[in-house]
Image (spheres, grey):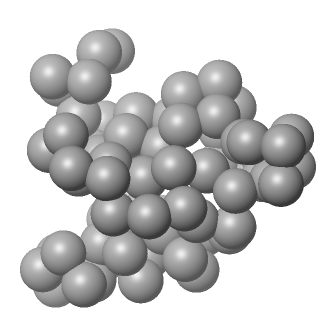
């Protein structure tokens, strides 16, 4: 999968454990857990952000590590 096939990209954990989050190429911030990711997506206008993250059907491109990894 590449960034053009998923509107949300979660980058690998940085040295502080945070992961940069992009939506359609725009950086929304650094998430330190799934709750942060859900909040970023909610603020970006996704009505069921929690459901989208839970379902993860190609909507999110997890770079480096999957959704369970938040420590560098």
Q: Nearer the viewer, residue 60 or 31?
A: 31
The location of residue 37, given as percent across then percent down, is: 48, 69
Residue 71 seen = yes
Q: For the point 61% across and 50% down, which residue is it?
A: 19
Residue 11, compared with residue 19, is above or below; it is: above
Q: For the point 19% across and 40% down, which residue is it?
A: 25
Q: Quadrant of residue 15?
A: top right
Is residue 34 shown left or right of residue 44?
A: right
Residue 48 seen = no
Q: For the point 12% across and 80% down, which residue is it?
A: 45
Is residue 63 shown left or right of residue 42?
A: right
The location of residue 17, given as percent across then percent down, is: 80, 53
Q: Nearer the viewer, residue 29 or 46?
A: 29
Is residue 48 shown left or right of residue 20?
A: left
How many marks overall?
A: 0
Q: Quadrant of the N terminus?
A: top left
Q: For the point 51% across and 49% down, which residue is it?
A: 20
């Amino acid at each position: 999968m590449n960034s053009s096939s998923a509107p949300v990209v979660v980058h690998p954990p940085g040295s502080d454990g945070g992961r940069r989050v992009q939506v359609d190429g725009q950086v929304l911030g650094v998430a330190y857990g799934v709750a942060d990711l859900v909040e970023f997506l909610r603020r970006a206008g996704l009505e069921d952000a929690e459901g989208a993250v839970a379902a993860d059907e190609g909507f999110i491109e997890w770079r480096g590590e999957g959704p369970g990894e938040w420590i560098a």
